[in-house]
Image: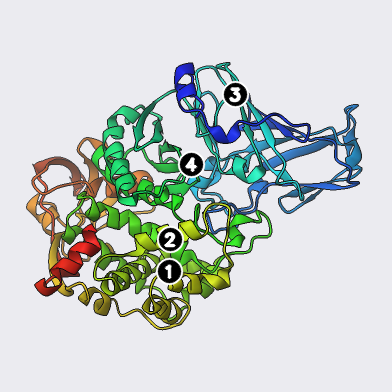
């Protein structure tokens, strides 16, 4: 990891880049000191090529996104030169530039625009954690696939990347900076996929480091107003990551791990797509800065733990489609149920396993996933959806990997616990698959079910063929009953503004932008307890003014409100403003859930959740 402090840089040296510079290196220079109209210059100097024609590609898609985002749309003024500075002919294609007379090619240059400030534009729907940011002197989010490309058939060549940056900004990354200057960083990778796998975030230094079971962890935060600091959120992040490492046991595929956290202002020209994207040794996270710190910490626990568990799959256990990923003509794997589903399941299971949540909270999460998964076509074979996830109607079902995918993993876990009398579960299966394959030995898609069956039980193979490759809906209640868990009705606090997470109690006038209590339905107990009536306009809450422009901030904030919290609202009724002070009273909702009821299964259930 690149550090401003030399001793820390030495402590976090990354062994994977300890190789000599080669004459075949592709040299890249990125200049962050000269930002012109929100764009930066990139210069690529290739080795001597013998081909008459070469094509330079910027990725259409990158691993972990499952979306064709066409990063070439952000490249402008692409030029190729010979060693005398004469321009060579260039023919532009989709995310590509073909250079004629390439034997004379000495360098290429182009400008890169960022994606964060165009997310609301038509056609620009790149998931923010996979996007880029250029804010001169403040922040640069370098997801490297948005800045650096590759020549056709040359992805296996080494890359030497030099980044000039303002002295006050520091680059957080899991790569090692080979330049001691505070105004220039140099990174080397053995191949293009390794470069793409290592993002860098430049900002004023705000980071913490700690070591967990032999793994060096970096937490770096960019908070535009300084509202959130790395020091503030790191204690709970450390608790979480210690619990994850303890849960994983001997699985440990990386010695360094960086969490790069970008907190968005949520404005019109800032990131809007909140979440995280996994990399082999890091995670990029984008969340709204206005989110209350306790809610931010809970969200980080869920999203970062999910991305961290990707070190198990697909980063360690994966198919040939992932090992030999094609950034511009992608071929997708059938096994999103494993890559995203098992990962999401682990992100929930480890929390009950390590005592971060109780059993009832875990069952609530499972109940929510079951309810959400049933909004999709339950007969759509998951392997077919996965293989065709880039096109309709399958791409619309992608988000179900976090619901049904996790439930598939749960059912396999239950089958294995039942068949082994509690001794083995899906974590032991992934350990066995890791020993069988590992980082550099991909499997054939068609062989995975047979291998999983061989390493587990015939019943697991039957489940996969029936419910994952087949079109039979999964009877979740039957599987949960094997662990002594049955369906019940549970009462839980609801949200002040949204009933059952579907029907809002408030509305917005698009002409005036004001927020008002809906006149067409009865207000819930949150409003009636404060004496708020139908058609009252909500001007401000706890001193912050709200309207259409920042209503999402209000909704997000409301999820952190607790019963009995002090609250102050400024409302307007019949044209007159008034201030209302009181206590939060949340509506109680009755929803379907699950509860442990069969004590004869207590030992098996304990092995499932705590084993």
- Residue at 17% x, 59% y: name it: 359
- Using the rendered image of the protein, determine whether residue 274 is visible from the camera's viewpoint: no
Q: Which residue is mark 3?
A: 178
Q: Which residue is mark 2?
A: 432
Q: Which residue is more in the foreground, 463 or 408?
A: 463
Q: Which residue is more in the foreground, 579 or 51?
A: 51
Count residues near mark 1 (Cα–Cα under 10 Å), then give few for <14, some for 14-19, many for 20+. Answer: some
Mark 4 or mark 1, which is nearer to you?
Answer: 1
Count residues near mark 3 (Cα–Cα under 10 Å), then give few for <14, some for 14-19, many for 20+. Answer: some
Q: Which residue is mark 4?
A: 281
Name which quarter of the figure residue 388 lies in: bottom right
Q: Is residue 381 left or right of residue 416?
A: right
Label 2, label 1: how far apart the Cα atoms are: 7 Å
- Residue at 30% x, 56% y: name it: 348
Q: Which residue is mark 1?
A: 455
Q: Which residue is more in the foreground, 531 or 131?
A: 131
Q: Which secondary structure lies at badge 1? A: helix
Label 1, label 3: how far apart the Cα atoms are: 44 Å
Way the structure is coloured: rainbow
Label 3, label 2: how far apart the Cα atoms are: 37 Å
Disc 3 vs disc 2: Cβ atoms closer than 8 Å? no
Q: Which secondary structure lies at badge 2? A: helix
The first of marks 1 and 3 along the sequence is 3
| Quarter of the image where the C terminus is located | bottom left
Label 2, label 4: how far apart the Cα atoms are: 22 Å
Mark 2 or mark 4, which is nearer to you?
Answer: 2
The first of marks 3 and 4 along the sequence is 3
- Using the rendered image of the protein, determine whether residue 237 is visible from the camera's viewpoint: yes
Disc 2 vs disc 1: Cβ atoms closer than 8 Å? yes
């Amino acid at each position: 990891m690149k550090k401003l402090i030399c001793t820390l840089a030495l402590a976090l040296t990354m062994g994977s880049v300890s190789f000599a510079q080669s004459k075949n290196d592709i040299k890249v220079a990125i200049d962050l000191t000269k930002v012109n109209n929100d764009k930066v210059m990139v210069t690529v100097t290739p080795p001597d090529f013998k081909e008459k024609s070469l094509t330079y590609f910027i990725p259409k898609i990158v691993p972990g996104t499952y979306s064709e985002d066409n990063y070439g749309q952000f490249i402008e003024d692409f030029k190729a030169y010979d060693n005398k500075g004469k321009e060579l002919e260039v023919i532009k294609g989709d995310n590509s530039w073909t250079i004629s007379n390439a034997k004379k090619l000495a360098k290429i240059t182009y400008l890169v625009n960022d994606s964060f400030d165009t997310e609301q534009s038509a056609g620009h729907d790149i998931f923010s954690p996979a996007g880029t940011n250029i804010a001169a002197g403040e922040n640069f989010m370098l997801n490297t696939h948005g800045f650096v490309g590759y020549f056709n058939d040359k992805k296996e060549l080494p890359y030497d990347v030099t980044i000039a940056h303002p002295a006050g900004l520091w680059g957080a990354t899991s790569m090692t900076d080979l330049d001691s200057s505070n105004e220039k960083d140099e990174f080397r990778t053995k191949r293009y996929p390794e470069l793409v796998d290592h993002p860098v975030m430049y900002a004023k230094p705000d980071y913490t480091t700690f070591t967990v079971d032999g793994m060096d962890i970096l937490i770096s935060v960019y908070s535009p107003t300084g509202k959130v600091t790395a020091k503030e959120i790191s204690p709970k992040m450390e608790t979480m990551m210690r619990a994850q490492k303890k849960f994983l046991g001997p699985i440990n595929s990386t010695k360094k791990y960086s969490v790069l956290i970008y907190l968005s202002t949520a404005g019109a020209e800032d990131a809007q797509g909140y979440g995280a994207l996994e990399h082999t040794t890091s995670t990029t996270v984008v969340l709204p800065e206005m989110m209350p710190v306790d809610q931010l910490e809970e969200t980080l626990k869920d999203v970062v733990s999910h991305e961290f568990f990707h070190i198990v799959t697909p980063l360690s256990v994966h198919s040939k489609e992932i090992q030999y990923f094609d950034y511009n003509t992608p071929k997708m794997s059938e096994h999103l149920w494993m890559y995203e589903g098992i990962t999401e399941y682990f992100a929930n299971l480890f929390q009950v396993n390590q005592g971060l949540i109780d059993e009832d909270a875990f069952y609530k999460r499972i109940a929510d996933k079951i309810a959400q998964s049933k909004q999709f076509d339950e007969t759509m074979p998951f392997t077919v959806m996965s293989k065709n996830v880039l096109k309709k109607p399958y791409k619309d079902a992608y988000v179900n990997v976090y619901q049904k995918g996790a439930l598939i993993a749960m059912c396999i876990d239950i089958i294995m616990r039942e068949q082994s009398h509690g001794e083995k579960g899906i974590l032991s299966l992934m350990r066995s698959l890791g020993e069988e394959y590992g980082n550099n030995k991909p499997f054939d898609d068609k062989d995975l079910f047979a291998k999983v069956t061989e390493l587990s039980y015939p019943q697991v193979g039957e489940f996969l063929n029936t419910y994952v490759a087949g079109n039979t809906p999964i009877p979740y209640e039957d599987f949960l009953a094997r662990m002594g868990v049955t369906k019940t009705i549970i009462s839980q606090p609801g949200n002040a503004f949204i009933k059952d997470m579907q029907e809002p109690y408030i509305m917005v006038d698009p002409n005036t932008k004001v927020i008002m209590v809906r006149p067409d339905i009865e207000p819930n107990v949150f409003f009636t307890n404060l004496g708020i009536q139908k058609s009252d306009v909500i001007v401000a809450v706890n001193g912050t003014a709200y309207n259409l422009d920042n209503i999402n901030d209000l909704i997000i904030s409301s999820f952190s409100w607790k019963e009995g919290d002090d609250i102050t609202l400024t409302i307007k009724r019949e044209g007159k403003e008034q201030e209302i002070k009181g206590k939060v009273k949340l509506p109680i909702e009755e929803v379907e859930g699950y509860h442990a009821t069969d004590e004869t299964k207590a030992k098996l259930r304990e092995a499932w959740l705590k084993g």
